[in-house]
Image (spheres, helix red, strand yellow):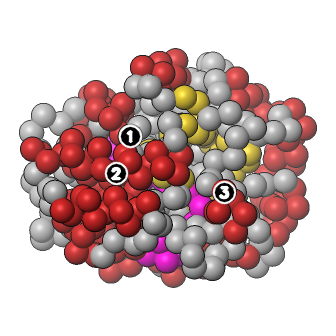
Amino acid sequence: MDLLNTLVDKGLRRESPTRDEALAVLATSDDELLDVVAAAGKVRRQWFGRRVKLNYLVNLKSGLCPEDCSYCSQRLGSKADILKYTWLKPEEATRAATAGVAGGAKRVCLVASGRGPTDRDVDRVSRTIEAIKEQHEDVEVCACLGLLSQGQADRLKSAGADAYNHNLNTSEGTYGDITTTHTYADRVDTVQQAQAAGLSACSGLIAGMGESDADLVDVVFSLRELDPDSVPVNFLIPMEGTPLAKEWHLTPQRCLRILAMVRFVCPDVEVRLAGGREVHLRSMQPLALDLVNSIFLGDYLTSEGQSGRTDLDMIADAGFEVEGAGTTTLPGHRAQAGGGCDSSHSGCGSEGACGSHAGGCGPCGEVSVQDTSASAAPEDAAVPAPADAAEAPSGVRRDLVAVRRRGAGTDLAPNA
């Protein structure tokens, strides 16, 4: 296909495709899918070889959030039967992080729910970062705490944080259909604050919320312009008890096309396969490794992933290797320049990145379980899917959605 040859040439030159070319990737047929994966795989291997970076999530607190993000199991009014607990102590978070590091994780992502941290919360997370770094000097730590206030990113950087995650999630044009308690501009501002503080910016998207192809292209091109070092791609996990519980629009083939499009638009960026891969890619997960260079190991924030051992076997069986702590993730030109999706355009990131799906202002939103008054809030009406949203495909596997009952916040061993 002339389209794919053009996209490979552009990717190897770190040049952006056109919007029409990105849309054309999403419109390719199933007969063309392996050609699309092979083409995007050439770009992936040019900048990242066959390395796969492992990341591990630690949910610092889990419960009810004052934000109304429709995809989140911890949102205002959620009826999802998830774990609820207040802030983990630094030693508890460190134990959870240690499990991920033992499984091969190079980065630990510390996530806390809510609209954004108070200054006291930043102090609390800073102590947790310091405790983890004391035991694991080489591990990268990414914070994901929601919307930042002035000066908070600098304080996290001083405490030893390497990165900050805050996803755009969907296009600016449809953002108000998904969330009403904060704006798309609020999210952009937080990512820019992290960049200005010298933190590696991580920002991505959630696919499968009923968006159109144009919406997907919009958000990925917005991410390229925002210039993060890492772009996590989440696939909606339709959790029971949330407004999007019935949004089953994804197939494995659709997911692969989305990942390929992201790779072509952001050729030399850490593209991370994040939440929902087990539910929607299923047996096609190994093929996605030809497109992404980073995944989460084990469980997510409120849902379970496949076993950590299975993740490691999948990587090895597909002919890839786990990226070591001594290896720089980003290509040399980006690591030196601190660039994002477009290394030729100025950006303030450093190395690395983080991110995952399951909730509000960060990858997951909630407040402390102490704030039980939030549970009395009325459940928000379900958000209608856009008019051009696809019908739910046949063969969906709703049985693969499992609520996390182990690891952080429990007495059971984590999955890592």
Describe residue 91's horizontal placement relative to residue 218 as left or right.
right
CB of mark 1 within 8 Å of CB of mark 2?
A: yes
Question: Where residue 395 sits: x, y (%)?
Answer: 12, 34
Query: How many marks on residues?
Result: 3
Lower position in the chain sequence, tag 1 or tag 3: 1
Give the number of the mark in front: 1 or 3.
Answer: 3
> What is the secondary structure assignment of the residue under circle 1?
loop
The magenta stretch spans which residues?
A: 222-241
From what the image shows, is residue 177 above or below residue 28?
below
Question: Where residue 378 sits: x, y (%)?
Answer: 39, 62
| Gap between marks 2 and 3 measured at Cα | 20 Å
Q: Nearer the viewer, residue 255 or 247?
A: 255
| Gap between marks 1 and 3 measured at Cα | 21 Å
Describe residue 1's horizontal placement relative to residue 114 as left or right.
left
Q: Disc 2 marks which residue?
A: 40
Lower position in the chain sequence, tag 1 or tag 2: 2
> What is the secondary structure assignment of the residue under circle 2?
helix
Instruction: Give the residue drawn at x 78%, y 34%.
Output: 94
Instruction: Give the residue drawn at x 21%, y 41%.
Output: 34
Instruction: Give the residue drawn at x 38%, y 40%.
Output: 290
Q: Quadrant of residue 215?
A: bottom left
Q: Disc 3 marks which residue?
A: 332
Where, quadrant-wise, is the C terminus in this rendering? Answer: top right
Q: Quadrant of residue 331?
A: bottom right
Residue 73 shown in magenta: no
> What is the secondary structure assignment of the residue under circle 3?
helix
Q: Disc 1 marks which residue?
A: 290
CB of mark 2 within 8 Å of CB of mark 3?
A: no
From what the image shows, is residue 194 above or below residue 405?
below
Looking at the image, can residue 259 be seen? yes
